[in-house]
Image (tube, rainbow, N blue to C red):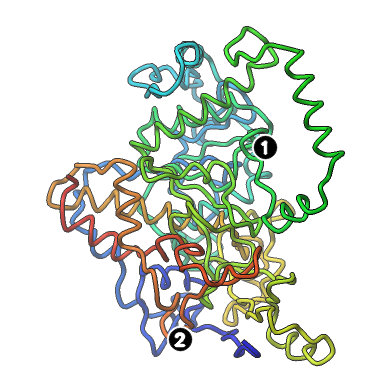
Amino acid sequence: MDDYPEPRFEHPYYFLWHLVAMGVIEVDEKTGMQGATGAEPGCPTIRSTVWDDLTGTPSDSPKTRIAMIDVGCSRNHPNLQGRVSHELSIDLAAHPFGAKLLPVDDASSPAPSTAFFEDLPNGVPMPSDLGANDQAYLTEFVETLAESRGIVRRFGDVEEKFSSHGTAIAGLLVGAPATGETRTDQILPYFGVDPFSELISIRTSFDNDPAQMLAALLYAWMHKADVIVLPRGLPDPERRRMKTKIDMHNSLESWKSCERNDLLVRIETLEALAGNHDPNAPDNGKSSEILWRITKHLLIEISKTIPVVCAAGNEGESQMIYPASLAHRENGIIAVGSVTSEGLRSGYSNYGDGLTVVAPSDDMEVHNRYQVRTNWKEYQARKDRFPIPDAVMRLPRSPLSLLSTDLPGSFGYEGEDLEGFRYRDMDSKTARNGFYTTFGGTSGACALVAGVVALVRRAEMAGPAPHSRRDGPDIKKLLQDSARDKGPVLPGGPQMVGDKMNAPDEDAHPLTYFFGHGLVDARAAVAAALARAPA
């Protein structure tokens, strides 16, 4: 590819373009989505939505529950009010047995029960592939949680300060237009993928604390979540390690790094002399590894009932981060990569074998030995001064990102790159008041897929066999079978194509290598769920 065409910097679908790409909404091709509020002339004309197909859901049926394991989220954002469960959301980062915030209107009432895990022993899934000692360890852990006492705060919601990532994820999942008179001049008519679902925010930290992650999974299970979303990797010190890039591995081999090999041999020898290789031995230093091992097996076991949607990672590697790397046809772990509006794998998105599906997200510049991905105008200005070898791919960097909800003030992302992405009809006051931010990564794509799973769950309630549920692997298969494995991301856009990132011949791989089974298609997935009951 000697040159590439200038991408469409001002796309007509505005801030909901990702919903159009996934088939959640259809817009009028003439008016596009150029208005910032419903009161303005030329406002978006939404021709139809997937939500219209789900109007048959009984009004008294339970809401679809999305369990989000992240850094927490704002419950007071105008587009999130009433969408995040105040009663069920929990903070496991502040207290090992959970912390909850009393609603403002209940601040003078007695504190509710603080036994947040008392119903846990009823039917906890026991992974069959765990050894007897690990099963006993898990049973004891569950009993400890069930007898635990958390705390209730009357004031001081820490999630309002440190939850910018989770707030953006929440907006993509369940955001909805604000109600009432709350600063309507600065609030967008924003929608998540499924604004009719209920979000349970399970706040965790970045600490190497397997007990925290194990408790988060058990909490989601206890409250019968319909889907679990993990928009970031787990901090397991062993399993989060990624393999060396193939080209770097070959270089290491060619250099014949004797010192490195000798060091590994010496480490293995010292470990052998130290003993204690039994993972179930009563050694305090091994307790963390035991819990991380149990967490892995429990995650897989839970996914067989509740689909677990995981971000593939943002390293640009041909492998997934953990736990997306656990995705397998026999479990319900869904590994999600991202695709740009221009039909390319996002420059940072992990890919390769094991990827389930992709969803729309933003892009980044790439400058390596295999491809140059940059702003079209910058490329045109520099191509004569810095000639690029013919073997290097020249690819367009997509100017579109996701737009999502943000924390107001200095703790939010603050939409610092909004102008660069040219959301042309959003006035500067609305764009920079702190309620919205440009967002992306496989985290954002992961949230979008989890939202589609929530739609499928609601479709199961409205289908020919109401309240019958598919298990995790069946939900994953439905997403795979209904995904679009070819064609453009947006109507009239470029076709989806592969690229080379870590090896010279990667672009010869089939599209499944870059996009899994394809771009998730909400309309097709919901139609399949409505058409038949699960087997």
Q: Are marks 1 and 2 in contact (CB under 8 Å)?
A: no
Determine the residue located farthest toward the top in the rendered image.
282
Q: Residue at x 55, y 20 (%)?
A: 150
As drawn, the label of residue 103 is: none
Q: Secondary structure at mark 1?
A: loop
Q: Residue at x 71, y 11 (%)?
A: 275
Tell me if mark 2 has few (under 14), some (14-19) or many (20+) residues whose alpha carbon lies within 10 angstroms of its own: few
Q: Secondary structure at mark 2?
A: loop
Q: Disc 2 designates what residue? A: 41
Image position, residue 196 (x, y; %): 35, 53
Q: Disc 1 designates what residue? A: 206
The mark closer to the camera, 1 or 2, is: 1
Could you say which quadrant of the image residue 528 lies in?
Answer: bottom left
The image shows residue 40, relative to residue 525, as above or below, that is: below
Could you say which quadrant of the image residue 369 lies in?
Answer: bottom right
Image position, residue 299 (x, y; %): 46, 33
462 or 126: nearer the eye? 126
Q: Residue at x 61, y 62 (%)?
A: 439
